Image (spheres, rainbow, N blue to C red):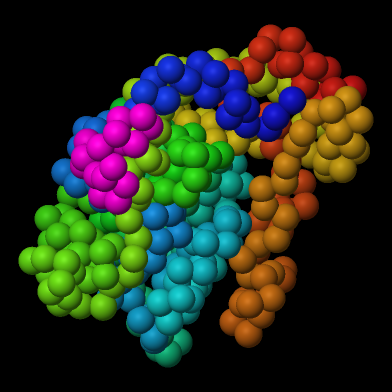
């Protein structure tokens, strides 16, 4: 059994994916070929933004956002502490200072109330210039953008939405990837929409941002590739990955429906059982269920029971950003993020993918509530 069964997915899409790849092999345009342009248009249409700009991976997508917003030394960028390292890494890479924010105890996403307190503290301290907020649509559920957008506007901060896990999620029908001044996603194979390697994209309605992103991702090029007008990076999505993603995107709405049915089955079977807290979707919100993440004080025991019968599980994330060795000098100490620290000690994720069999589902449920 797999946590995310990519082999089962490929077996369903094999004919179409193979044909797409063969087309690329036939025309030989392996970098920025026609499939890349086609994918960007279809991503734009699916998400509901004017521009979708692909790049080499999700981390580069965040880095490109930092470059577009001219985030630099002396700037403060606010982000959740309970997240994957790339969220904070790209802030540090830009030379700015990440200011970590507590989690909401229900959604696990960035807490708007704590965010505002930390913005006010940075302003009062006067040593850094507040510049942007990076949110994360954790485990598939969009963050509280009603409050987050209001906070960003109040303090004149740019909002970057990391929708790598949230791709396909929504709030009142408005898709993840539309809530920030810039939004990013990752096409890492395990993401809700993943390729067979690395890949990423940035979404925006801002024409100027889009133009700058298209330059920055190809060495800061100008009118042609031998006229470089700024310092950029080399971050292009290769054409074969775009070909794979085109077929996966076509299948994605059906897969998303299957993920939600699986989440409902988990909730019905596990809700209130064995001292387990199941994930809740806020009214009006839709999750893409990048992970199905439970909370339990008996995490180690449950994960051991699962392992004994061949069922994989995973902890996302065992170490918060403020606990990372690289950030130890920021003086954002343990104890100031009690919710996030508790989550890191109690969360674990079960297998979640749209091709799960009923037998596997029953096996997982029985082992979890044993």
| Location of residue 130 in the rendering, given as x and y in whole percent from the top left corner | 36, 76
Q: In this view of the protein, can residue 161 be seen by the observer?
A: no
Q: Which quadrant of the figure has residue 82?
A: bottom right
| Location of residue 197 in the rendering, given as x and y in whole percent from the top left corner | 49, 45
Q: Is residue 319 above or below residue 363?
A: below
Q: Is residue 178 above or below residue 262?
A: below
Residue at position x 69%, y 9% from top? 358
Quadrant (top left/top right/bottom left/bottom right) for the C terminus: top right
Residue at position x 26%, y 78% from top? 231
Q: Is residue 167 above or below residue 237?
A: above
| Location of residue 181 in the rendering, given as x and y in whole percent from the top left corner | 26, 56
Residue at position x 67%, y 48% from top? 316
Depth check: 130 or 254 in front? 254
Q: In this view of the protein, can residue 340 be seen by the observer?
A: yes
Asked if residue 106 lies in the magenta stretch, the reply is: no
Image-based side of 320 in relation to 73, left or right: right
Quadrant (top left/top right/bottom left/bottom right) for the N terminus: top right
Asked if residue 32 lies in the magenta stretch, the reply is: yes
| Location of residue 300 in the rendering, given as x and y in whole percent from the top left corner | 87, 43
- Residue bounds of the magenta highlight: 21-40
Magenta stretch, main secondary structure, is: helix
Depth check: 247 or 273 in front? 247
Q: Is residue 266 above or below residue 147?
A: above
Image-based side of 68 in relation to 226, left or right: right
Image-based side of 243 in relation to 310, left or right: left
- Residue at the top extreme, as displayed: 358
Q: Which quadrant of the figure has residue 169?
A: top left
Depth check: 226 or 126 in front? 226
- Residue at the left extreme, as displayed: 223
Residue at position x 58%, y 47% from top? 108
């Amino acid at each position: 059994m797999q946590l995310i069964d990519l082999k089962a997915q490929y077996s369903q899409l094999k004919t179409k994916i193979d044909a797409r790849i063969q087309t690329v092999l036939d025309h030989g345009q392996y970098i920025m070929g026609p499939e890349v342009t086609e994918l960007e248009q279809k991503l734009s249409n699916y998400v509901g933004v004017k521009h979708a700009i692909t790049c080499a991976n999700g981390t580069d997508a965040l880095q490109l956002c930092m470059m577009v917003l001219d985030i630099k030394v002396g700037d403060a960028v606010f982000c959740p502490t309970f997240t994957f390292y790339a969220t904070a890494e790209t802030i540090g890479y830009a030379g700015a200072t990440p200011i970590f924010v507590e989690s909401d105890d229900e959604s696990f996403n960035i807490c708007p109330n704590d965010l505002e307190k930390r913005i006010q503290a940075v302003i009062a301290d006067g040593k850094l210039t507040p510049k942007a907020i990076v949110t994360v649509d954790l485990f598939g559920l969009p963050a509280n953008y009603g409050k987050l957008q209001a906070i960003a506007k109040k303090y004149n901060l740019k909002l970057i939405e990391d929708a790598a896990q949230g791709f396909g999620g929504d709030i009142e029908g408005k898709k993840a990837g539309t809530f920030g001044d810039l939004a990013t996603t990752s096409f890492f194979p395990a993401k809700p929409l993943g390729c067979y390697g690395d890949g990423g994209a940035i979404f925006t309605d801002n024409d100027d941002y889009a133009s700058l992103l298209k330059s920055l991702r190809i060495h800061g090029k100008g009118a042609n590739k031998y006229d470089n007008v700024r310092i950029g990076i080399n971050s292009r999505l290769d054409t074969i990955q775009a070909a794979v993603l085109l077929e996966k995107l076509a299948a994605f709405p059906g897969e998303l429906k299957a993920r939600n049915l699986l989440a409902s089955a988990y909730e019905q079977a596990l809700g209130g059982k064995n001292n387990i807290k199941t994930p809740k979707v806020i009214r009006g919100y839709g999750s893409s269920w990048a992970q199905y993440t439970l909370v339990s004080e008996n995490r180690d025991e449950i994960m051991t029971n699962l392992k004994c019968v061949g069922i994989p599980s995973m902890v996302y994330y065992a170490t918060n950003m403020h606990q990372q060795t690289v950030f130890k000098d920021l003086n954002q100490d343990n104890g100031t993020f009690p919710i996030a620290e508790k989550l890191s000690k109690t969360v674990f994720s079960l297998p979640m993918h749209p091709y799960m069999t009923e037998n596997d589902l029953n096996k997982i449920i029985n082992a979890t509530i044993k």
